């Protein structure tokens, strides 16, 4: 037993302090104290690279064994599988066969992070569901911003918020362990169905994620997406802002918008707008310009829904341009 415990302590030492603390949180207090003492004794011990690889290989074999044994409990079910035992068995068999076929089609490479880019985003998101928010954030930090946004958009809302918070923090993980975790995620992902759910809107999901970020994170991720895929970034930008956002902008940004939108267009856009929106606009105009706009609104006739939509879209485009330039 002592030999097994010694090996466990060495593995925790190789995996790093963060992983060791995560493991010890799940142990009784007396075991935590013993483990911390033994890890402290190893703090100045240099383990040869070859021995580190041997320990990590053994850890990975055990990890894969646990995943294999736990597979029935980890299976992801869909709503269609509740229609009866007979149909359920048939559905499970067909989906299992589809996953096996998909696994044969996609052969993982020696670069798991490249594989995470190439796999279906739905496979990757499902494979990440069982991971801790911190682990997900570390993995996402090593793939493209566009793929990160897509994956975030597919996570449950509460988990997505946790991951976004972790993305803002600084994390350290041994490269060897990080690569192995990514490879394990790829191994799970290839066994999952690659097709999207019905009525999936990829761009809108990314937009929803970006709107949940603060302005600096939003601009940073959008610019990174633009570098990878300008067309996707353009589609995102078209939906990222709405007319009502004008009330949330700083006055200098609103003033820049008003310089780029003709008075007549703004008057049309303000037709039946909330008083808060009107006051935001009025407060950023000179007295003369404000009086002219108010007069135009006073004598304004009926505005059709098409005219209103077109005018507000022009304002939204100005909001997008000014907001991005403000960063």
Image: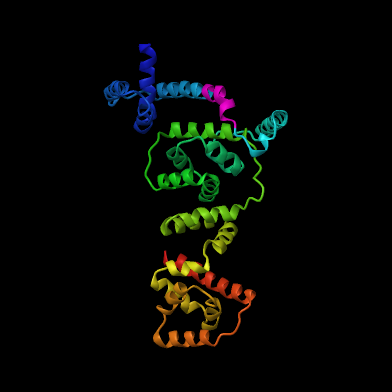
Residue 224 in sight from this viewpoint: no
Q: Name the residue at 52% across, 77% down.
A: 270
Picture coordinates of residue 115, whole percent (x, y): 57, 39
Picture coordinates of residue 154, whole percent (x, y): 55, 46
Residue farthest along the top direction in this orientation: 1
Quadrant including the C terminus:
bottom left
- 193, 79: nearer the viewer: 79
Q: Name the residue at 61% across, 79% down.
A: 303
Magenta segment, which residues?
65-75
| 287 up-or-down from 97: above or below | below
Residue farthest along the front direction in this orientation: 84
| 86 up-or-down from 230: above or below | above
- 318, 93: nearer the viewer: 93
Picture coordinates of residue 106, whole percent (x, y): 65, 35
Residue 208 in sight from this viewpoint: yes
Q: State whether the magenta stretch is mostly helix, strand or loop.
A: helix
Picture coordinates of residue 159, whole percent (x, y): 47, 43
Q: Is 71 in the magenta?
A: yes
Q: Name the residue at 41% across, 44% down.
A: 166
């Amino acid at each position: 037993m002592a030999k097994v415990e010694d090996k466990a302590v060495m593995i925790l030492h190789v995996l790093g302090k963060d992983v060791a603390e995560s493991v010890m949180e799940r142990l009784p207090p007396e075991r935590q104290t013993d483990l911390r003492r033994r890890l402290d004794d190893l703090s100045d011990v240099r383990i040869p690279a070859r021995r580190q690889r041997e320990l990590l290989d053994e850890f990975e074999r055990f990890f894969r064994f646990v995943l294999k044994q736990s597979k029935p409990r980890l299976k992801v079910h869909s709503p269609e599988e509740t229609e009866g035992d007979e149909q359920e068995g048939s559905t499970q068999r067909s989906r299992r066969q589809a996953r096996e076929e998909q696994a044969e089609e996609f052969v993982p490479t020696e670069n798991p992070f490249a594989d995470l880019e190439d796999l279906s985003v739905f496979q990757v998101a499902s494979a990440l569901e069982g991971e801790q928010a911190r682990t997900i954030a570390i993995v996402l930090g090593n793939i493209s911003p566009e793929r990160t946004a897509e994956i975030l958009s597919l996570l449950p809302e509460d988990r997505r918020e946790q991951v976004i918070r972790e993305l803002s923090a600084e994390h350290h993980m041994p490269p060897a362990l990080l690569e192995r975790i990514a490879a394990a995620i790829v191994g799970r992902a290839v066994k999952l169905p690659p097709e999207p759910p019905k009525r999936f809107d990829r761009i809108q999901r990314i937009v929803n994620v970006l709107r949940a970020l603060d302005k600096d994170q939003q601009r940073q991720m959008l610019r990174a997406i633009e570098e990878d895929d300008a067309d996707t970034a353009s589609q995102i930008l078209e939906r990222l802002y709405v007319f009502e956002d004008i009330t949330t902008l700083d006055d200098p940004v609103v003033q820049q918008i008003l310089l780029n939108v003709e008075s007549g267009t703004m008057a049309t856009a303000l037709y039946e707008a909330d008083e808060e929106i009107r006051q935001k606009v009025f407060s950023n105009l000179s007295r003369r310009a404000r009086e002219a706009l108010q007069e135009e609104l006073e004598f304004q006739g009926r505005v059709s829904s098409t005219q209103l939509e077109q005018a507000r879209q022009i304002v939204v485009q100005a909001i997008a341009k000014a907001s991005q330039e403000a960063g």
